[in-house]
Image (spheres, rainbow, N blue to C red):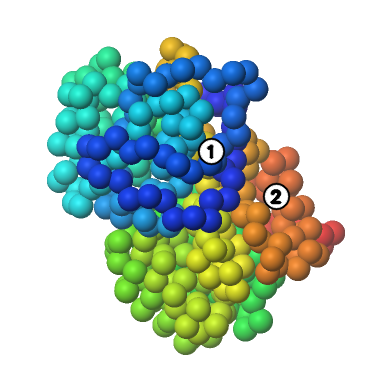
């Protein structure tokens, strides 16, 4: 497994992203969300990078939007032409990827684990095109697979929830029951268990990443059952979870990017996932003629997973100090948050009596 040498976290972007049109070049007017390189940027205005969303599309306030920030940063710094193709159903993945490949875009990014089969089918047909796949792996020489240790960040979110709850009961709302979302669940439950082994964790799945109404329904049910902190890992569905927190005046934890701006008094923290940074790094490889397929992993130690900067607005400083101590324990290898529910079964909480 190859690690990228340059890992950069995204800066908070509070403004809504501009809507994009299918197969249309989208000019970015936002500030770069990834730190610029130290040397003068190369002019790559003759290159075109494209993104194929999952079914949540842009405007999900989470996964797709966070990935698009990497594209806008490349546009701002290198003059890259950027475009996005939004997907309404899974059957469109292969046609969308193929159309972009026929247009000879220099980098085509499939956003999300659901695009695995489509990327695996299309990439071999266009061996001279660079592809990237987020949150999954395919063994193709022209595909860079950007993967994350979500369980590590979710562990910290579980600890925050356990420290912040007043009712002694917390919740988790996921989108679809996939390996990636289960990785979040396992890490979150382990974080809660580390702070209080007896604390109850309510778990619900919406079965979709683009159904805010279902997310709100599930979150309201958890709040009504006594949970006062809910961690949502549900894409656009998660905006409904945040709406429920506002309606019940309860606490909620966001995902993928700092979502505090959606409900400043209710979103107490968010798990930051460096989606834009991963795209930015792969884009630089293409620009520099150094692209290599393979797996590129981002965890806490590599700087690709963290809690959101806005956490200090709603979480006490002494609690944040404990979270930082847990984070360092993960970096030092003293804590290995479980990545599956099977691993959770055998997880032994670390001794935190010294925190």
The residue lying furthest to the top in this view is 289
Residue at x 39% of width, y 21% of height: 45
Q: Residues within 10 Å of mark 2 (few under 14, many from 20)?
A: many
Discs 1/2, front:
1
Q: Is residue 42 left or right of residue 145?
A: right
**Dot 1 alpha-carbon crowd within 10 angstroms: few under 14, some 14 to 19, many 20 or more:** many
Q: Where is residue 330 in the image (x, y as percent from the top left)?
A: 68, 46
Q: Nearer the viewer, residue 284 or 335?
A: 284
Residue at (49%, 52%) from the top-left corner?
256
Residue 135 placement: quadrant: top left
Residue 351, quarter of the rendered image: bottom right
Q: Name the residue under label 2.
A: 327
Q: Is residue 340 visible?
A: no
Instruction: Write the residue at 64% across / 76% down.
Output: 165
How far is disc 1 from disc 2 in space, using C-alphas? 27 Å
Instruction: State the residue at coordinates (15%, 36%).
Output: 95
Q: Can residue 219 be seen in this view?
A: yes
Residue topped by disc 1:
32
Q: Which of marks 1 and 2 is nearer the N terminus?
A: 1
Q: Which residue is at the front of the view, 19 or 174? A: 19
């Amino acid at each position: 497994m190859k690690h990228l040498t340059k890992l950069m976290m995204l800066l908070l972007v509070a403004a809504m992203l501009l809507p994009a049109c299918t197969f249309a070049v989208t000019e970015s007017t936002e500030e770069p969300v990834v730190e610029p390189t130290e040397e003068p940027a190369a002019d790559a205005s003759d290159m075109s990078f494209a993104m194929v969303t999952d079914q949540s599309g842009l405007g999900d306030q989470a996964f797709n939007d966070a990935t698009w920030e990497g594209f806008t940063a490349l546009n701002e710094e290198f003059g890259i032409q950027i475009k996005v193709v939004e997907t309404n159903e899974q059957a469109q993945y292969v046609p969308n990827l193929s159309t972009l490949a026929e247009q000879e875009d220099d980098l085509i990014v499939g956003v999300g684990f659901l695009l695995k089969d489509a990327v695996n089918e299309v990439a071999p047909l266009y061996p001279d095109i660079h592809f990237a796949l987020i949150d999954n792996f395919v063994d193709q020489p022209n595909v860079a697979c950007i993967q994350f240790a979500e369980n590590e960040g979710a562990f910290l979110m579980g600890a925050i929830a356990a420290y912040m709850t007043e009712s002694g009961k917390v919740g988790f709302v996921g989108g679809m029951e996939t390996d990636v979302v289960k990785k979040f669940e396992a890490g979150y439950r382990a974080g809660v268990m580390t702070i209080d082994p007896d604390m109850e964790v309510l778990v619900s799945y919406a079965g979709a990443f683009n159904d805010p109404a279902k997310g709100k329904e599930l979150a309201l049910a958890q709040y009504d059952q006594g949970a006062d902190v809910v961690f949502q890992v549900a894409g656009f569905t998660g905006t409904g979870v945040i709406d429920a927190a506002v309606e019940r005046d309860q606490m909620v934890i966001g995902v993928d990017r700092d979502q505090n701006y959606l409900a400043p008094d209710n979103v107490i923290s968010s798990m930051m996932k460096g989606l834009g940074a991963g795209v930015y790094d792969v884009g630089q490889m293409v620009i520099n003629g150094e692209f290599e397929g393979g797996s590129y992993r981002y965890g806490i130690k590599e700087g690709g997973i963290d809690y959101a900067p806005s956490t200090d607005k709603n979480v006490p400083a002494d609690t944040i100090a404990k979270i930082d101590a847990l984070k360092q324990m993960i970096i030092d290898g003293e804590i290995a948050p479980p990545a599956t529910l099977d691993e959770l079964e055998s997880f032994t909480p670390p001794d935190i009596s010294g925190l």
